[in-house]
Each structure stands twice: as structure tokens, then as C-alpha cells.
Image: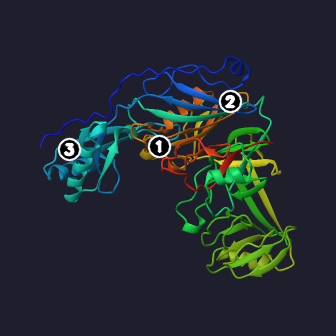
Amino acid sequence: MSRRTLVAGLAMATTITGLAVPGAAAEQAAVKFPSSKFPLGTRSVTTKTMTSVASGIDLYDVRAGSSTDGYTVTVLMPNGRDAGTREAAEATLAAVEATGEVASMQRLVRPQVADAAEQELFMVRVGLWSFKQRAKADATAKRLKKAGLKIKVDYLGDDGLKTTGPWHAQVLTIDARAFRGSYGASLGTSVAKRETLSSMARRDGAIAAVNGGFFNIHTAKELRGEPVGASVVAGRLLSEAVPGRSAIVLRGRTARITELRTTITAISQDGAKHPIAGVNRAAVPGELVLYTEEYGAKTPAADGADVVIDANGRVEAVRAPGAAVPKGKRVLHGAGEAAMWLNEHLWQGWTVKIDTKVRDLRKGRNLQLTPDLHVVAGGVGLVRNGRTQITARRDGHDSLNMILRRHPRTLAGTTRDGSLILATIDGRRPGVTVGANFIEAAQFMRWLGATQAINLDGGGSTAMVVKNKVVNQPSDGRERAVGDALLVLPR
């Protein structure tokens, strides 16, 4: 059978009339919406509508680009992935052609980022249809599936290759000179339980909010609100850092982006020390894990020991594991070697110090855990000191799916004068908005004026709430419950 080259996406320029922001507001603002063309795709003119939310806070509804992408059918590799080595792609191509279908092998390159080299990959695809011909792609997919092949219908705008869009974004600018409120973080009703962004924003009386960092989907279902990375709420460390991972540090009305490392140590009154491996998460055998009253779940029920500590560091009880954390208390849980340490050094009536350090790796000093400190962990670093610096490998997201393919994105950035920019780019809505990949997300934030920027959780989690209203269009069709939130508060 013959093979043909698949062309992924067509380019077409488009012009959309920009709406001017009132001159007086623009002159007073320290953070200004850019006047240059939209930075993605064919750099079309941007349509934007500005709403003044509160003193120093403006919301922009941003649209750009047009739809020219269509559909194809992707045949999955033996390992279930949509891209792989040339050898795997050739074997997959042969399997498709054995069914009588005409297929093509597409070469693509996962781009180089700051901490991961580029990677050559190959995909096997069948057919190319316009946007209005989705039904034909579905029919072909059905035939291939009946032939025993694993397939999926792909919208070419999601690929991360050349596209004309369209894009739909919400941009919230918080002017450091005019803003009179403060920033905060929320984990909802508990660490373990997920909650919608609008619920968290409403409970804390937030003017605006965006979803926070990634949460752990690889743990028990009842624990999946747990942040993957550092979380500090009102000076209390509620989740340990993934060493060196990006985060946004909020104190009062200041916000800064950095990388963090946490060190937590239990020190008994007899001087014995033991590292605490984690906070408010499932424990691995041999670990010592700290649970706070915010956890909202029982400690692990496996073999081991729990030590209940009161607010003054006094050991109130040594108990069997698998119970809730009493209000106003903390619990140290250990199994194996860690349980032995607890039994030897934390007797009832003794005292224990929980030495907690959260280190700002850019400044080289520890954060002061005062009530005005909040931390939200990021997913991937995007911009550092005004330059694109995508730390996908360090932050655990160096796959083709995360670096190159387009998804809804939630982004946070700071400007040179300390203003904060929060943005959502909606995606997964063919013909309406395509989302962004990491490279495009970095370009978008630099265009907005961010000198530092990070990627927060995205996909179906992407949400922005302003005055108790969800202002973007979540790709699930409704708000998804998430692990944490970044809040803009009135005072």
C-alpha cells in the first residue's frame, strides 16, 4: 500500500478589531495590557474587553485567531501511546495497512526546553478531514477499532504544531501600586478532599481566584485533594515541597515566584531526631509522616504507631494507627523503623519539637512561617528573569503530552514592579479555543509583561472565578473539584 505525508494544520491570517482600553485607566496602571498583536499562531490582532473589578484589579476577556484545523485518526503504538520510536511506528503502520487502510507516518519533534533535550518521535495516522467532516473521521475510527487496532480521533489544533487558533483567554491583572487587598491560598474544607474553586473563593470572601497546583491522582480516592508540592496556608505548612519545584509565595499584597525545599524534623526531649518525610499524605513504609487537623482523613491503618501531640508539643497519647486527627492536635505516624523510633523516643507526657524549614532557593534563606504567608505549588516553571525557561523535567512534566500538545492552562506571573498576572487559556474546544502548550504559555505570559511565570494545574482543572462567578469555560463543561486555590482577597 502507498504511504502519504500528513500535513498537520493549515495557516491562515486573520484580523480582528481590537477594542481600546480607556486612556486614563491605561495611564494610571503599572501593569498594562499589551498593544502588540497576539503572540501565538499568525500573530493576529486581539479582541479584548476590559472590566474593572476593584481598585487595581482589571479583568480582560481576550480572543484571537480563527479555526482552520481539521481531524485525523491516530493509531496508538503497542505501548498504548500515540507517539513512539521509528521502529514502533513502522510496525504500527504495517498493522494498519494490513487492514486495507492507507496510513501515513508523521515525524514530530518534542521541542528542547531548559532541562530536557529535544526528542524525535513518530505517529501513525489515517486520513485528514476538515472541521465539518468529523463524522468521516469517526467512521474511519470505528472501522479500525473493529479491525483490532487501538485508535483515537485527534483534532489537529491539539497537536501543538502550526495552528491559527482560535484562542480564548481570561487575564486578571493586579496592579501593585493600586491594589489594597492581599493574597492567600486555600485547600478548601480539608487537604484530602477536593473542592470547586468557586466554593473556596466564596467561603473566604475572595474578589477573584484561580485553581492552584497539581493534586495527587495516584493515591487513594479519598485522599486525592493532596497537593503535589508545597502548600502553606496562613503560615502552616500543610504539604511538603517537591524539592526544587516551582511555587508562588504570597505574603500580604506581595507575590513572588521561586523554587522551594522543605526540611521537617522531629526532635524528642531526649535529643533524638528523626526526619519527617511528608505532611498530610499517604505514608510509605518506614516513613515518619506528620498529620495536621486540616488533613480531613484518618491516618494510615497499616501496622505502626500514632503519636498525638498537643499545641504545646506535649505527647498526649500513643495510639494504634487509623484514626482521625483530633481538633487542635497533630499526629506523627510511623511504620517499621519510624514506628520503632516513635516508641523509643516519644513517650506519653514527653515533649517533641517539630522543626519546620521552608527554604526559598532563589534567595537562599528560609521563609518565616507567619500568619500572612501563603504558598501555592506550581506545575512547571515557564519564565525566569524575562526569558523563557521551561523546567519541565525538574517539575515532572517532560512528556510529549505536556510540553508540545495543547491543553487548557492556568498561569501565574509577576512583573518587574511586583504586579501579579493571573491567566486562564481555555482549550479542548475544537473550533472555539485550542489552549496552549508550554512554549506558547511562556510566550503568552511574556507578552502580558511577566518577568517570572509558572504553569499551575490545567486541563479540566483550569478555572477563574471573579466576584463569585466562573468567568472562563472549563473544558469538562462544568467546574472540576481541585486541590487548592490562589485567592485575591479584599483586605
Name the N-terminal-most of marks 1 and 2.
Answer: 1
Q: Which residue is rendered at x = 74% and y = 47% of the image?
A: 184
Q: Which mark is residue 415?
A: 2
| The N terminus, quarter of image | top left
Q: Which mark is residue 407?
A: 1
Give x and y (percent) for residue 236: 77, 56
Whether residue 260 is visible: no
Using the rendered view, name the quadrant where residue 256 is placed: top right
Question: Is residue 112 depicted above or below 352 in this figure?
Answer: above
Q: Residues within 10 Å of mark 3 (few under 14, many from 20)?
A: many
Amino acid beneath label 2: Thr
- Of helix, strand and loop, which one carries label 2? loop
Give x and y (percent) for residue 44: 46, 22
Q: Are marks 1 and 2 in contact (CB under 8 Å)?
A: no
Name the N-terminal-most of marks 3 and 1.
Answer: 3
In this orientation, which residue lies closer to the viewer: 359 or 206? 206
| The C terminus, quarter of image | top right
In this orientation, which residue lies closer to the viewer: 490 or 1? 490
Q: Which residue is mark 3?
A: 103
Amino acid beneath label 1: His
Q: Is residue 93 left or right of residue 416?
A: left
Amino acid beneath label 3: Ala
Mark 2 → mark 3, Cα distance in angstroms: 48 Å
Name the N-terminal-most of marks 2 and 3.
Answer: 3
